[in-house]
Image (cartoon, grey):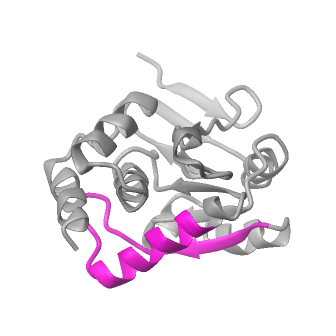
Amino acid sequence: MQPQVQTSSDSPIQVDFLPLAELGIPGRIGLTLAPGQLFLDSTTVYDRDLVSDLNRLRQVYGIDQLVCLLEPEELKDLGIPHLLAEAEAIGMTTAWLPISDEGVPASMPEFAALVARVVQTASNGKSAVIHCRGGRGRTGMLAACCLVQLGHDPELAIQTVQQIRTGALQAENKRHYIHQFASI
């Protein structure tokens, strides 16, 4: 079976937004895959264009802040070593906290500061988008913790993220970390 090819033109980058309206937050927090990635897995060839993906995030979705959770080696392996500089060049602010694909943040204080920064962006009426490689594991963990920061029960936060982002938060260690975050 031939792998499916996913390009920026035939499969434009999509953002799934958390339902924050009922919390009285004027901005938005979204989840997406790594913009511009060049990658092959068992079912899909990702042959995306970084500038096209970033422009779509900025122009179509109104993204003000790009939050990257990829490790330095992943940025290189995915063919997007200049992702943050490219995002800043088109007017986005950036935040970067490398987290291993299968892991959780090494520093709870650094992670909590990032959660606060993303929530502050949304509280200021702006839009943030979080991404890792596929936008489900690390991205889902950060998004759920943003909901916890805004007063959600951690289990409800996990369910909310899973409802808006198919395949999100499948790893037990990430769900456990959300509960740990809720207890600080």
Task: Point out the image quarter for the N terminus.
Answer: top left
In the figure, 45 relative to 142: above or below?
A: above
In the figure, 92 relative to 55: above or below?
A: below
Q: Is residue 43 visible?
A: no
Q: Residue at x 44, y 34 (%)?
A: 165
Which residue is outermost to the top?
Answer: 1
Q: Nearer the viewer, residue 5 or 31?
A: 31
In the figure, 84 relative to 16: above or below?
A: below
In which quarter of the view is residue 79 placed?
Answer: bottom right
Q: Is residue 136 left or right of residue 183?
A: right
Q: Which residues are magenta?
A: 92-120
Q: Nearer the viewer, residue 156 or 77?
A: 156
Q: Residue at x 22, y 43 (%)?
A: 155
Q: How many marks?
A: 0
Q: Position of residue 74 (x, y in %)?
A: 45, 65
Task: Point out the image quarter for the C terminus.
Answer: bottom left
Q: Position of residue 104 (x, y in %)?
A: 25, 66
Q: Residue at x 76, y 66 (%)?
A: 92
Q: Position of residue 160 (x, y in %)?
A: 37, 36
Residue 171 highlighted magenta (yes or no): no
